[in-house]
Amino acid sequence: MIDSFLYLGLVFALFSIGIFLTTRRNMIRILLGVEIVLNAGNLAFIYFASPLAFRTGYIDPLGQSIVFMSIILGGSVIAVALSLVVNAYKQYRTMDVRKLRRLKW
Amino acid sequence: MVILQQLPLPLFFLFSPFVVALFGLLGERFGVKKLREVVAVVVSAVGVIAIYYLFLALNAASQSVPDKILVVSLMAVPPLAASFEIDMLGIYMAFSATLLSFFATLYSYRYMEHDTRLTEYYTLLSAMTVGMVGVAFAGDFFTLFIFWELMSVSSYVLVAFRRDRPEPIEAGFKYLVMSALGSTVIFIAMALIYGMAGTVNFAQIANVLPKMPLNAWLYLVFTLLVIGFGIKSAIVPLHTWLPDAHPEAPSPISAMLSGMLIETGLYALTRVLFITFDPATFRLVVAALSVLTMTFANLLALLQQDVKRMLAYSSIAQMGYMLVGLAVGTTFGMLGLLMHVFNHSLLKGLAFLSSGSIVHMTGTRDVGKLKGVGRAMPVTTMTLFIAFLGLGGVPATNGFVSKFILFGSTMETDVGLWWLLIIGVLNSAFSMAYYLRVMKTFISEPAEGVKGLKEAPGLMLGVTVTMAALIIIFGLWPAPVLNFADSASKALVEGLQNYIRAVGP
């Protein structure tokens, strides 16, 4: 029970930090926030797959394989995102996301 | 139900992006003109045929409708391995996606001819289609998430495809951040479901979760699922990326995004909610979201000056109508939802492609500057009007049939959503206001810049006229779509037990 509170609390903390970062002005920070939220999910999977969660006595390979996949997918998303940031910088000459407001509601 | 241990031949369609990329690069290397375009069109046509063959294989697999399930799992038996679980619903969604993709690819042949980096364009378009097909067939969260990300990542790049202008980049970045957050929220919901059920296989989850008493964790999972899938399917408080991303993408991509991508989000939401919860538990929440979505989007669509932006808001409103079917949650409600998914893919696809033709010839999307364009481009404008009338739900178009079923389903006894019928019909009538406004502008006295315009190129015209003809045909003779959607909705609602049994306890 203590473990459960500890790890799920950590997941919640990572989630909050990530969401907080996505409200910042700098584009790179926003992307870092997205990545941290994804890592909250990864941690939750690792925890549920580990023997700590249900005292099963073995590690479930399913959860771990999902985490491997999600790391790769997260990397590809961030690669696309960074290329967009480079292009946005070329067009707008700023990293401030609030300056990107050609489009209104 | 049949369990296949190797990939059936039609499913090799899932590798089609590699084919397009290979031939595109070969064409570039050896200077063969138009090779990549032709290959992309052929590959997307093969996709439609492949799904049809899969449909035949599914029909041969079993006699009764809700029992038609193909399980495709490599190397091991399903609960222990990632799998495709193909039922009528998946075939239905995949067929809609590949059909629209075929039209969009054919249309791109002329529409995109002045752009550069076309190999990337066709590869990504193909990858997006494959992602949608994979999401429709997925039998567990693992497979669903991979294809979901394939679909999403290709669509991020396609929205920002014209990177020489600032607006697409801005729209693409906004879409990327929101959608990537949505995916991660789905991922956390997956983790919690995995923690509760001990598996990510849909059938096994459906065996465990609906029997659990509702507790705080289940409410959390529900919230996360609605937020995560809701971002992709543009349910109203989470829709803000859509009116930016859809107009800024190239028109064939707008057609794919509005016509099929957001519906794939709704499909995934429907599938996952049906396996994790009893329909009665989420009825009121979804009904409230539906009312909010359609009312808000219809009001904002009225204020738009940009024709593609107006269509984007109209897409959000149509999502609101589709949510009515999910709120009802019976076989009849799902029939309405699925009919509207297919019909909307044709209608909104046609609306974006026709307005794309107009944008292609005039170079502006401003309704005020397009005054009288209907006199210069009569055929394109005619097809656009057919799409508008269908979106408004005028009889003799297929939009009427599906809206009739959707709103009719709210009157089912023991559902108690009759008020949704009133709000829905009022909204649908109200939505005609902005379609008629644009139609009136397009056929009024021509403005200066519009005189002397030529009709769109023959191929683009051919695609739009074919789609308009399909809309009228399915409006007057809905039986084929109706039967197909009927077996799909039966597979979802009544076939749920078979869906669970197909994978085993």
Image (spheres, rainbow, N blue to C red):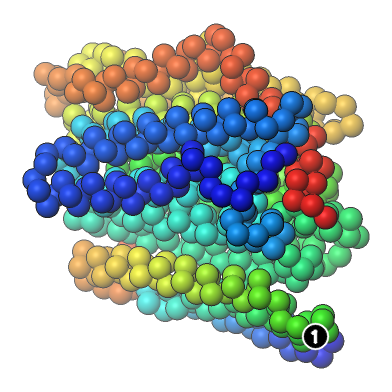
In this rendering, the answer to whether B365 lies above or below B3 is above
The crowd level at tag 1 (other Cα within 10 Å; few <14, some 14-19, many 20+) is: few
Badge 1 sits on which subunit? A
In this view, the residue in front, B238 or B278, is B278
- Image quarter of the N terminus of chain B: top right
Q: Residue B234 at x, y = what percent?
A: 54, 48
Q: Residue B425 at x, y = what percent?
A: 65, 24
Q: Which residue is drawn at 37% across and 36% down?
A: B44
Q: Residue B263 at x, y = what percent?
A: 55, 41
Q: Which residue is drawn at 54% across and 13% down?
A: B475
Q: Can residue B391 be seen in this view?
A: yes
Q: Which amino acid does label 1 sit on?
A: Gly
Q: Which residue is drawn at 19% across and 23% down?
A: B457
Q: Which image quadrant for residue B182? A: bottom right
> Which residue lies under the disc numbered 1?
A57
- Image quarter of the C terminus of chain B: bottom right
Local SS, label 1: loop
